[in-house]
Image (spheres, rainbow, N blue to C red):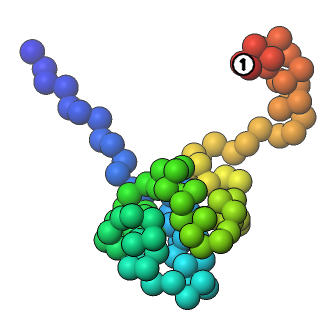
Amino acid sequence: MRAWAKPKIDSSPHPADQHVGRQIAAVRVQSDVSQAQLARSIGISFQQLQKYENARNRVSASMLYEIANVLGVPVSRFFEGLSGNATGRDDPPLPAGERIEFIASAEGPALD
């Protein structure tokens, strides 16, 4: 009997997670707030905040909300400048005409 190899899991951070982490750090620095101060304000360790900023850990929606509140910015601020193709996928998006054609097809509305 042949043993199956486990599929390799890509453990590198998603580009969107990296972007959000960099934005958290940038807004924090612009606000003249230290990692320790921000971490204390949101009830986590500065090490955990560091992991968020370096994308070693993903930031939950509720934590992102808390960070935005403390720094006085909308949550959307952390997504500004995020490339529309930050999915990490190699496939290019469909041309607009093909997207419109699909949406108008019977299959398109069925996906809702």
The amino acid on which the numbered mark 1 sits, given as a three-letter code, is Leu
Q: Is residue 8 left or right of residue 24?
A: left
**Viewport quadrant of the N terminus:** top left
Please give the count of numbered marks on the rendered protein: 1
Residue denoted by label 1: 111
Instruction: Depth check: give the residue in front, 78 or 110.
Output: 78
Residue 58 place in picture, x, y as percent: 43, 54
Residue for point 30% across, 41% down? 8
Q: Dot 1 lies on which element?
A: loop
The outermost residue toward the left is 1
Q: Is residue 78 above or below residue 112?
A: below
Q: With 35 as the anchor, is 66 left or right in this view? A: right
Other-residue count near label 1 (Cα within 10 Å), few / some / many at <14 / 14–19 / ≥20: few
| Quadrant including the C terminus | top right
Query: Would residue 87 be visible to someone looking at this image?
Result: yes
Residue 51 in view, yes or no? no
Q: Name the quadrant containing residue 70.
A: bottom right
Q: Residue at x 54, y 65 (%)?
A: 67
Measured as percent of width and height from the top left, residue 101 is found at 88, 25
Figure check: 87 above or below 43: above
* Residue 75 position in % (x across, y down): 65, 59
* Residue 34 horizontal/vertical position (percent): 45, 84
Residue drawn at 45 percent across, 71 percent down: 41
* Residue 6 in which image quadrant: top left
Residue in front for this viewpoint, 20 or 86: 20
Residue 31 drawn above or below residue 74: below
Q: Nearer the viewer, residue 47 or 84?
A: 47
